[in-house]
């Protein structure tokens, strides 16, 4: 690794922790339908307005010794944990996805616009997963807004084309609707939430049909593994609803980075050559 690898790696981690600090606000306020912009962050116990130096990711929590400077009420360790893990996730994205793209010498300057939006999209997996786990919802601000933006940036040359974006949105949402209807017939109850469906449309528009399909297949296996683990640990009862959003996020991430290899191995088991599937 050279100097620039360490430099951009450090920048990626720091940027991730800053986003993680903001995501803490999003995770708390958005399910309550509160503004994520105003009012400024404050202590929920005494109302003390948090100053800028009390809002430095990870470091402020350590400096304050996990207590509010106003009333000394404890500050949950969840805040620095989210910030730290979001920083690691940002570093992971840089190392395994954005690094090679950023250092390709033939890139035109305008390709960095959709890349920046893709980065934000992937980072939003953090609050989406937490909110879906805790509240069983995926806010429309993410899904509908992301779908519109994904379709819009497809008209910027060099990335996902408009044809791929519209096909990805239709394929991602369409397959989940189909699976949901089949699940309803079998289970006699709603089997797929509309938040998941809209989110797959968003992923398909942003990254193309290959990632949309990969999100479904890989996410389904991840969800099955997760539910089995939860059942074995007695954290979930048989028949309980499993939030599928986090697993779709896992599926989208793996499909984006290693999707061709994973789907190639999967379809190879059933005798299908992935090269014969043009949308992948």
Image: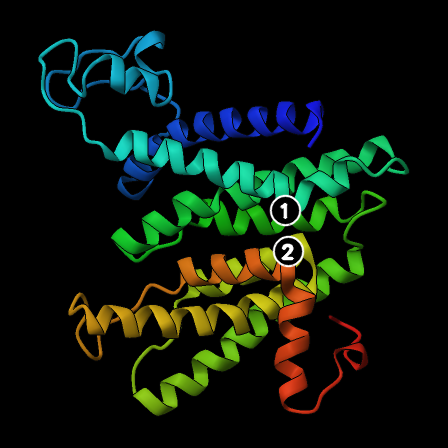
Q: Is residue 18 left or right of residue 269?
A: left
Q: Quadrant of residue 126?
A: top left
**Kind of element beneath mark 2:** helix
In the picture, the disc for residue 202 is none
x 67%, y 68%: residue: 261
Give the mark nearer the N terminus: 2 vs 1: 1
Colour approach in the figure = rainbow
Residue 30 % position (x, y): 33, 39
x 34%, y 23%: residue: 58
Quadrant showing the C terminus? bottom right
In the picture, the disc for residue 257 is 2
Q: Are marks 2 and 1 in contact (CB under 8 Å)?
A: yes
**Kind of element beneath mark 1:** helix
Residue 94 % position (x, y): 62, 38
Residue 84 % position (x, y): 39, 32
| Residue picked out by circle 1 | 96
Residue 141 % position (x, y): 46, 44
């Amino acid at each position: 690794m050279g100097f620039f690898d360490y430099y951009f790696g450090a920048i990626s981690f720091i940027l991730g922790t800053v986003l993680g600090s903001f995501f803490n606000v999003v995770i708390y306020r958005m399910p309550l339908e509160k503004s994520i912009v105003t009012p400024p962050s404050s202590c929920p116990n005494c109302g003390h307005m948090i100053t800028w130096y009390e809002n430095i990711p990870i470091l402020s929590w350590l400096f304050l010794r996990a207590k509010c400077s106003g009333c000394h009420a404890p500050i949950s360790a969840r805040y620095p944990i989210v910030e730290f893990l979001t920083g690691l996730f940002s570093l992971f994205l840089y190392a395994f996805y954005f690094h090679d793209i950023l250092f390709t010498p033939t890139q035109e300057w305008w390709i960095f616009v959709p890349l920046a939006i893709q980065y934000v999209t992937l980072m939003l997996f953090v609050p989406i997963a937490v909110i879906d786990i805790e509240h069983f919802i995926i806010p429309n601000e993410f899904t509908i807004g992301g779908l519109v933006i994904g379709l819009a940036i497809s008209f910027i040359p060099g990335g996902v084309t408009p044809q791929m974006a519209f096909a990805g949105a239709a394929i991602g949402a369409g397959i989940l609707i189909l699976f949901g209807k089949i699940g309803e017939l079998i289970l006699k109850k709603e089997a797929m939430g509309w938040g998941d469906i809209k989110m797959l449309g968003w992923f398909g528009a942003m990254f193309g049909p290959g990632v949309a399909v990969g999100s479904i297949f890989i996410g389904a296996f991840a969800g099955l593994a997760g539910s089995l683990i939860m059942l074995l640990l007695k954290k979930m009862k048989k028949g309980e609803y499993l939030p599928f959003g986090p697993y779709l996020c896992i599926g989208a991430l793996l499909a984006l980075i290693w999707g061709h290899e994973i789907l190639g191995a999967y379809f190879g088991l059933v005798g299908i050559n992935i090269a014969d599937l043009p949308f992948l």
